């Protein structure tokens, strides 16, 4: 199949699933990559927890923060829909190092906000700038991600909130919902997330112990319904971070094969279907990302659109 037909087929399958996606796959050994719309900025949702964790661990490594420092979190709500400490019935005291683990492995919003309580968002930006990573902006914490129209409608009216999310986007990716407005919320492009993962896996601008800790936590990610089914096997290891908000479905990660091959995989998407559960969309996103990976791994000529 020609490069043009291959990319047209990928786009067509995403369209059929109701997805507009930015995809990028990069071979860590050669730097070769395949991509679709990799420069488009999209709201980051929980992907923003990765650069926050990086900034915290950098300061632990420098001795500016103590990884064993106990942080007390207020009691949460057992009916809260998010995972982790937000559902705790009682106050809890957790070490800073362990808050990093919770933020990355189970995407704990309260843990991530506690991390931001130890350093300003400007410190996160400074670390990314020092690594020469452009295209990621961390502007606010994660409590705001639980204050969208979805939480204000009754459960049986979730489609109304999702319809607002779908129809409110402007051609320049502005949005009346603050968490979906690229000028106001945390954002990142597929290329920027790929650059961050490349730095973590290859140790470019990241201290060895910090990079090792981040890789460890990404390998421990327990949210594995999106891309993991297409990249996990007895002959490969999948390490990743997901991001989900309203009609957004993202995952970024690295697949490491038993033969030594290592590939960054970034899949960012927005859905045009007003439904919270979209197994077909999740499957289509994973399958198309896998097809890009397989074409690159088969060493066919690189293509980009």
Image: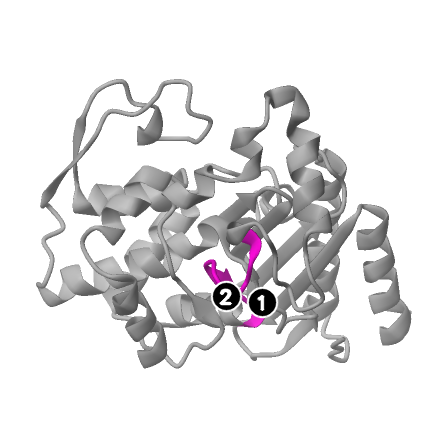
Q: Residue at x 42, y 24 (%)?
A: 80
The answer to which image quadrant residue 91 occupies is top left
Q: Is residue 238 visible?
A: no
If the image is split into quadrants, where does the N terminus sit? bottom right
C-alpha distance separating marks 1 and 2: 11 Å
Where residue 275 sits in the image (x, y, percent)?
A: 71, 33
The answer to whether any part of residue 180 appears in the image is yes
Q: How far from the left and from the top, in percent, is residue 263?
A: 56, 64
Q: Quadrant of the C terminus?
A: bottom right
Q: Is residue 207 magenta?
A: no
SS for tag 2? Answer: helix
Q: Which residue is mark 2?
A: 193
Q: Is residue 186 magenta?
A: yes
Q: Which mark is residue 265?
A: none
46 relative to 5 in the view: left or right = left
Compared to residue 32, the image places residue 196 above or below, namely: above
Report the number of discs. 2
Query: 79 or 260: which is nearer to us?
Result: 79
- Which of disc 2 and disc 1 is earlier in sequence? 1
Q: Which residues are magenta?
A: 180-191
Q: Residue at x 38, y 66 (%)?
A: 200
Where residue 226 appears, as percent x and y from the top left, is: 62, 42
Residue drawn at the location 56% of the way across and 53% of the way down: 180
Disc 1 target residue:
41
């Amino acid at each position: 199949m020609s490069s043009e037909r291959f990319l047209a087929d990928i786009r067509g399958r995403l369209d059929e699933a109701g997805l507009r996606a930015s995809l990028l796959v990069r071979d860590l050994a050669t730097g070769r990559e395949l991509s679709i719309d990799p420069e488009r900025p999209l709201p980051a949702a929980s992907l923003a927890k990765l650069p926050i964790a990086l900034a915290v661990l950098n300061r632990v490594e420098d001795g500016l923060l103590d990884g064993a420092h106990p942080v007390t979190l207020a009691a949460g709500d057992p009916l809260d829909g998010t995972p982790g400490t937000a559902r705790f019935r009682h106050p809890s005291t957790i070490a800073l190092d362990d808050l990093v683990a919770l933020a990355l492995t189970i995407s704990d919003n309260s843990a991530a906000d506690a991390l931001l309580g130890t350093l300003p968002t400007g410190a996160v930006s400074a670390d990314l700038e020092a690594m020469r990573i452009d295209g990621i902006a961390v502007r606010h914490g994660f409590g705001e991600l639980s204050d969208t129209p979805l939480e204000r409608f009754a459960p049986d009216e979730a489609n109304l909130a999702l319809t607002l999310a779908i129809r409110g986007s402007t051609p320049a990716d502005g949005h009346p919902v603050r968490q979906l407005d690229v000028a106001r919320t945390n954002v990142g492009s597929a290329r920027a997330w790929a650059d961050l993962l490349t730095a973590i896996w290859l140790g470019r601008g990241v201290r060895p112990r910090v990079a090792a800790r981040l890789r460890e936590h990404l390998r421990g990610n327990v949210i594995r319904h999106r891309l993991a089914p297409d990249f996990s096997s007895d002959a490969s290891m999948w390490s990743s971070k997901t991001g989900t908000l309203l009609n957004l479905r993202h995952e970024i990660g690295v697949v490491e094969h038993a033969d030594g091959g290592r590939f960054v995989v970034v899949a960012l998407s927005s859905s045009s279907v007003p439904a919270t559960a979209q197994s077909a969309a999740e499957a289509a996103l994973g399958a198309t990302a896998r097809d890009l990976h397989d074409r690159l791994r088969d060493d066919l000529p690189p293509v980009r659109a």
